[in-house]
Image (cartoon, helix red, strand yellow):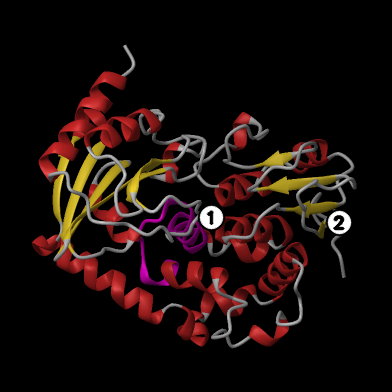
Amino acid sequence: MHPQNPAPTEHLRLGFAGPDGLSTPHLSVDGMTPIGPNLSHWPGNRTPPQWKADLSTAIALRFVRAPAAEQATFLGDAEFVVNDHYDTDGFGSILAILRPDIATQREELLLAAAATGDFGTFHTKRAFAIDRIVARLAKPESPVHAAFATITDESERSLARYQWLIEHATAVLDHPGGFAPLYTDELAQVQHELDAGLRGALERRRFADLDFAIATSQGPQHRMTLNTLAGAYRVLHVQNDRDGARFRYHDRTESWFELVTFHPLPRRDLRPLAARLEALEPEHDGARWCADAPTEPIPELYFGVPKAQSYGQITRELRPSRLRQEQVAAEFVAFFRQSQPS
């Protein structure tokens, strides 16, 4: 039985926006469709100032706590709530809109899980578990893999996963242990690296005025370990291996999203720095210095095999560089100092 005065969001149905958006009137959350009301922290979003927050989930939670008349005016004739990609912050945002009774009672967990996914930092074990459950819900090792196995269209697959998560939200959020195969091994790895890093296995050198850190380790490190321990939003990882040093820099996503409570320094186009390093070390053995445009959510500069990389993935092949660590570090520092706004 519905209450006499239903919430303005109660009539909304779950949808998904493909590459061309959605013609039916809708509310888009987390991502952005070209038109219509939008609740998002993505750059260029159309979120009203009174609801802005660092995460889209937080924005949606602020919206559902607004006066009903204000919500109704904002929604207009929207019939659907949609996202245009699939991730944990998207799940939290949609859950807040469609099931505010569940979301508001688990706000802290939803925000920590969204930050784990969007910012790539460690917060709590449960938040890590929730983020990985969402990300890997349809993977072969998932206990509910069969529900998605026959869906080949990516948009339909995203919609089906969101629908499943909304229907089973309390089970996922309150009892993540039922999905342990999706996160336990990686969680153990990250916790081990964080502990070892704090004990000295990850050497950190920070340039506070440049918001830049150099993290040096023997062998590889999880990206979440680097982000959590670096103490900066510009991170150069120096991976020392038996055959030499591998270099990979990345801008963290915090400097791509529109944030409210903290503001990393503006990004710089890394391609001129890559060209400078390439002048010092020309291409050899199929590897060279490469850099992404600053408009990428997580732009990288690295020495390795030139290759595109999907958002959220770390798939590029690094190669040992002939440059000394001190030389590379000096080039980064000089570049950021020269690029500082006057």
Q: Is residue 294 above or below residue 92?
A: above
Q: Quadrant of residue 72?
A: top right
Quadrant where the N terminus sits is: bottom right
- The one of 88 and 289 positioned closer to us in this rendering: 289
Q: Which mark is residue 205?
A: none
Residue 342 in the image, given as x and y percentages of width and height: 31, 11
Q: Is residue 194 left or right of residue 105?
A: left
Number of other residues with Cα within 10 Å of mark 2, as a class: few under 14, some 14 to 19, many 20 or more: few
Asked which quadrant contains residue 194, the reply is bottom left
Query: Seen from this angle, which residue lies furthest front?
Result: 285
**Image-based side of 119 in relation to 67, left or right:** left
Quickly name the residue at label 1.
310
Which of discs 1 and 2 lies nearer the camera? The answer is 1
| Residue 34: image location, x then y, percent | 76, 37
- Name the foreground residue: 59 vs 100: 59
Tell me if residue 76 is in the magenta stretch. no
* Position in image of residue 122 (x %, y %): 35, 61
Q: Residue at x 82, y 47 (%)?
A: 26
> For the residues marked 1 and 2, what is the alpha-carbon distance in whole angstroms?
35 Å
Q: Position of residue 218 (x, y in %)?
A: 15, 63
Q: Earlier in the sequence, mark 1 or mark 2?
A: 2
Per the rendered image, the range of residues in magenta is 108-127
Q: Amino acid at mark 1?
A: Ser
Tell me what residue is drawn at x 83 percent, y 53 percent: 80
Q: Count how many numbered circles sit on residues in the image.
A: 2
Within 10 Å of disc 1 (Cα), the crowding (few <14, some 14-19, many 20+) is few
State the residue position of label 2.
Answer: 11
Q: Residue 265 occupies which quadrant of the picture?
A: top left
